[in-house]
Image (cartoon, rainbow, N blue to C red):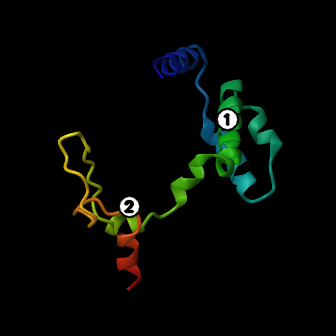
Amino acid sequence: MDLAVAVAVAVGAGSEAHNYRESVSPWFRSIFRLQPDVDAMASAPVQVHVHVLVGMLLFAAWPFTRLVHAFTAPVHYLFRPYIVYRSRDARTPAPTGRPRVGWSPVGTSDRDRTTR
């Protein structure tokens, strides 16, 4: 990450200033209106072209990666009990046949309560 930031600063420091509001912003508006204006983006420097291309590739690849789960709403997790992790070492007595408190299977009892 530090290397990426250093490269970004080095590339940005060596280039001349670019007013993105006059070229890139109208180009994005034309994309959103479904009437792309190629000439608006032509005057932008190569760094802006690469930046936009990487953003579009990320946007296109989003549904095919695990990033798609960022849009799911895990409402179920708001109401489930805490998961208690305990170790079962040699000092733990053998099970007696009845379930112990805190050892219920995960994902069963909490779902049953929400459907009632």
Residue beneath label 1, please? Answer: 54
**Residue 85 as seen in the image, left or right of residue 58:** left
Relative image position of residue 107 (x, y in whole percent): 41, 64
Q: Earlier in the sequence, mark 2 or mark 1?
A: 1
Picture layout, residue 21 above or below residue 7: below
**Number of numbered discs overlaid on the protein picture:** 2
**Hey, what amino acid is under mark 2?**
Val
Relative image position of residue 47 (x, y in whole percent): 66, 26
Picture residue at 51% right of the left edge, 19% below the top: 9
The quadrant the C terminus occupies is bottom left
Picture residue at 54% right of the left edge, 14% below the top: 10
Label 2: how many Cα within 10 Å (few below 14, some 14–19, many 20+) = few
**Residue 91 as seen in the image, left or right of residue 37:** left
Label 1: how many Cα within 10 Å (few below 14, some 14–19, many 20+) = few
Relative image position of residue 67 (x, y in whole percent): 57, 48
Q: Nearer the viewer, residue 26 or 113?
A: 113
Q: Which of marks 2 and 1 is in front?
A: 2
Classify residue 18 by image quadrant. top right
**Hey, what amino acid is under mark 1?**
Val
Picture layout, residue 35 above or below residue 7: below
Q: Nearer the viewer, residue 39 or 50?
A: 50
Q: Nearer the viewer, residue 79 or 91?
A: 91
Q: Is mark 2 on a helix, strand or loop?
A: loop
Residue 1's disc is: none
Q: What element carries label 1?
A: helix
Residue beneath label 2, please? Answer: 106
Classify residue 54 by image quadrant. top right
**Residue 1 as seen in the image, left or right of residue 40:** left
Q: Nearer the viewer, residue 47 or 65?
A: 65
